[in-house]
Image (cartoon, rainbow, N blue to C red):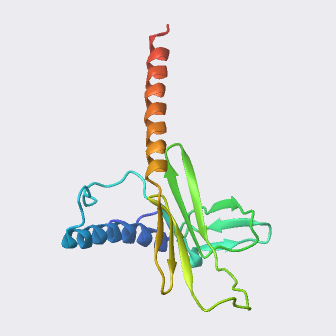
């Protein structure tokens, strides 16, 4: 509701930001009802930067290999040199500290010759590096807690060193 009429974003991108917030809130409420929310808090304060999402209607792959992400009528689009010849169905850009990270989703062509009748799926993420679902089988999840811990430790150390360097520079005449 806060994104309505926000200039500078494609309307569907603004809706996706709001949807992401409400999805997070609903997930927290669902976990709270089941009693499985120890250590989790609702999203109670506004994030400084949300990931911006572009759906298929706001993306276009030009003939010269540049991906065009629309930012609404009257605003300049985001142009990205696109290494793949495939046009993505959804694109997300999120700030990760000092850099931006781009994620894209594509349609995957299926092999015509099936090797079995069992279906499965894999989901990649940060909290759970990979979650594998096999139809009629057991779910497998690879946790990324150690990797996240190392990333947080790196960021804390980097921040500490940067602040010491900044103070050192201020002390110089």
Count the numbered circles shown. Answer: 0
Coordinates of residue 143 in the picture (x, y in percent)? 45, 59
Coordinates of residue 131 in the picture (x, y in percent)? 49, 69
Coordinates of residue 122 in the picture (x, y in percent)? 55, 73
Coordinates of residue 34 in the picture (x, y in percent)? 21, 73
Q: Quadrant of residue 115?
A: bottom right
Decide if residue 8 is in sight here. Answer: no
Q: Which residue lies at the image location 28% right of the left edge and 72% below the top edge?
A: 26
Q: Nearer the viewer, residue 126 or 64?
A: 126
Farthest residue to the right: give it: 64
Farthest residue to the top: give it: 173
Left or right: where does residue 144 sit relative to residue 86? Answer: left
Looking at the image, residue 96 lies above or below residue 36: above
Decide if residue 41 is in sight here. Answer: yes
Q: Nearer the viewer, residue 30 or 38?
A: 38
Quick one: quadrant of the N terminus? bottom left
Left or right: where does residue 146 sit relative to residue 89? Answer: left
Looking at the image, residue 47 lies above or below residue 124: above
Q: Quadrant of residue 152?
A: top left
Q: Which residue lies at the image location 75% right of the left edge and 62% below the top edge?
A: 83
Q: Which residue lies at the image location 47% right of the left edge and 26% below the top edge?
A: 161
Looking at the image, residue 81 lies above or below residue 152: below
């Amino acid at each position: 509701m806060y994104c309505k009429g926000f200039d500078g974003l494609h309307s569907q991108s603004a809706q996706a930001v709001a949807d992401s917030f409400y999805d997070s809130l609903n997930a927290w409420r669902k976990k709270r009802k089941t009693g499985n929310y120890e250590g989790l808090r609702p999203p109670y304060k506004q994030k400084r930067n949300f990931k911006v999402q572009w759906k298929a209607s706001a993306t276009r792959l030009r003939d010269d290999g540049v991906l065009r992400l629309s930012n609404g009528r009257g605003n300049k689009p985001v142009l990205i040199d696109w290494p793949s010849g495939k046009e993505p169905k959804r694109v997300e850009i999120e700030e990760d500290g000092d850099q931006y990270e781009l994620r894209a989703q594509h349609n995957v062509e299926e092999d015509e010759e099936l090797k079995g009748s069992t279906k499965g799926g894999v989901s990649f993420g940060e909290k759970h590096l990979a979650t594998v679902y096999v139809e009629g089988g057991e779910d497998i999840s690879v946790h990324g807690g150690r990797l996240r811990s190392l990333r947080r430790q790196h960021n804390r150390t980097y921040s500490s060193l940067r602040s010491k360097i900044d103070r050192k520079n201020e002390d110089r005449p």
